[in-house]
Every structure is written in structure tokens, then in C-alpha cells.
């Protein structure tokens, strides 16, 4: 990871809104299955409420526990954008709290993901604005910088670029490159169809497990009760 600079890129190459909208209502797990279970942000970054997340990434790379450039990012973001913050996973200071989240909601942004900490979670849990974070702390942020806006970042072990499609639910968050969007949506249809078929045909007595174990050469020892 390169050193954090002090710069703000004002332009984002956003995907067609109709492409983004088509990911609405699809379970993150199904999207992940359609992407070889890749591009899922680490499970240590958890949802703080039950609001579904869908939008376009505006990225922030910041010094841990600092909110200066993040606040610039949320002021230049468009409605429907998701602020995705690389705070290096540090949780000693919050990068955001109730006031910042309320401002994002007021500006009709689509969500906040912080690879760092937030505070005021009692209020955030009751909000309809989706927030994901790696940790919780009462200690507030600094506003000094440095930081960068709209550069490629690492968030929860996944590279996120400005303009990427961001989808989140109670399971977590997945990042979709817009150039792969149509392909992923096509694969999602097959995943959902396969799951529906399995629900109808799966032998619920568990016999399929024994068959797979035998195919893989598993040795059964003793007598099964």
C-alpha cells in the first residue's frame, strides 16, 4: 500500500444507473457465488443496522481516526453514492458518528462503509441509512488529514475503485466491477435457478453427503447407528 497523499479527485466514472438498479434486491451471497466467492469485503466489517445497501463507490483513503477528507468526499458525492473508507482497519478513533451519517442521509447518499470505527451506534442502529464498520468506539475523529478521495483503496481485503457497484445486506458487502456487471447478473440467474432446483430435489435425509464422501475416497469406520 502506497503512502497516503493529500489530494481529491473530483470526477468519478459512474456506471449506468439502470445497471446498478438491477442489482437491487439480490442477496449478496448469490452475487458472491456468481463471482467465485471473490470480492466480498471481510466479515469483520459488519452492518450496524438492517438497511439494504446499493450504490456506486466514492472512495476515501485516510489516516486512521481522521475524518477530514471523508467529509469532503461526502460533500462532493452524488445521490446514490456509497462512501467507502480505507482507514487501515484502525478502531482507536471513530471516523464517523451520528451527525456525519445524518448529513450523508440528508444528501441522499446510499451508504457508508468504514474499514475503521464509528460511534453513536445506538442512533445508527435505528436509522434507515446503511452503515458498515470494522469497530465501535466512543472516541471521536480528528480533522487534520492527510487523505485521498477517489483513488483505488483496500477495504476489508478487497480493492475498491471509484465507480464500482457496491451491494450490501445483513450478510455483508460485495464489490462489483461495472465492466463485469452484465456477466455477473447473467450468472446470478443461473445461481438462483440452481438453488431453486436444489430445494426441490435435494434428498433431505442427507444421503447426498455420503455419496460425495465416497466419491472423494472417504473411509467409513465402524457401524452407523
Image (cartoon, rainbow, N blue to C red):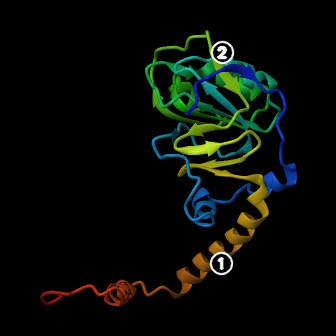
Which residue sits at x=62%, y=18%?
67
Residue 148 visible: yes
Counting the numbered discs, the total is 2
Q: Position of residue 20 (x, y in %)?
A: 79, 52
Residue 205 visible: no
Q: Is residue 57 above or below residue 89?
A: below
Which picture quadrant has residue 85? top right
Which residue sits at x=15%, y=86%?
221
73 left or right of 155 in image:
right
Q: Is residue 218 above or below residue 162?
A: below
Q: Which mark is residue 68?
A: 2
Q: Are marks 1 and 2 in contact (CB under 8 Å)?
A: no
Q: Position of residue 146 (x, y in %)?
A: 63, 16
Judged from this view, the residue extending furthest toward the left is 222
Give the mark nearest the N terminus, 1 or 2: 2
Q: Is residue 122 above or below residue 178?
A: above
In the image shown, does 11 or 202 lie closer to the viewer? 11
Q: Look at the numbered disc 1 and give the secondary structure of its residue.
A: helix
Mark 1 or 2, closer to the camera? 2
Q: Quarter holding the C terminus? A: bottom left
Q: CA distance from mark 1 to mark 2?
A: 46 Å
In the image shown, does 139 or 225 lie closer to the viewer? 139
**Residue position for label 1:** 193
Q: Residues within 10 Å of mark 2 (few under 14, many from 20)?
A: some
Which residue sits at x=56%, y=25%?
123
Amino acid at each position: 500500500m502506497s503512502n497516503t497523499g493529500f489530494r481529491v479527485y473530483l470526477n468519478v466514472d459512474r456506471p449506468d444507473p439502470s445497471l446498478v438498479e438491477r442489482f437491487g434486491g439480490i442477496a449478496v451471497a448469490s452475487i458472491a457465488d456468481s463471482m467465485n466467492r471473490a470480492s466480498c469485503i471481510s466479515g469483520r466489517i459488519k452492518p450496524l443496522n438492517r438497511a439494504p445497501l446499493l450504490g456506486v463507490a466514492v472512495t476515501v483513503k485516510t489516516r486512521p481516526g481522521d475524518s477530514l477528507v471523508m467529509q469532503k468526499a461526502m460533500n462532493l458525492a452524488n445521490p446514490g453514492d456509497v462512501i467507502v473508507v480505507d482507514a487501515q482497519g484502525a478502531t482507536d478513533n471513530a471516523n464517523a458518528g451520528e451527525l456525519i451519517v445524518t448529513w450523508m442521509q440528508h444528501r441522499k447518499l446510499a451508504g457508508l462503509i468504514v474499514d475503521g470505527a464509528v460511534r453513536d451506534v445506538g442512533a445508527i442502529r435505528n436509522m434507515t441509512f446503511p452503515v458498515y464498520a470494522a469497530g465501535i468506539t466512543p472516541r471521536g475523529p480528528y480533522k487534520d488529514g492527510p487523505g485521498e478521495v477517489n483513488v483505488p483503496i483496500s477495504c476489508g481485503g478487497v480493492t475498491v475503485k471509484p465507480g464500482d457497484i457496491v451491494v450490501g445486506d445483513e450478510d455483508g458487502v460485495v464489490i462489483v466491477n461495472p465492466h463485469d456487471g452484465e456477466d455477473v447478473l447473467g450468472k446470478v440467474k443461473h445461481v438462483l435457478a440452481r438453488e431453486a432446483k436444489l430445494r426441490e430435489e435435494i434428498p433431505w435425509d442427507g444421503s447426498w453427503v455420503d455419496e460425495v464422501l465416497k466419491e472423494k475416497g472417504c473411509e467409513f469406520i465402524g457401524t452407523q447407528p
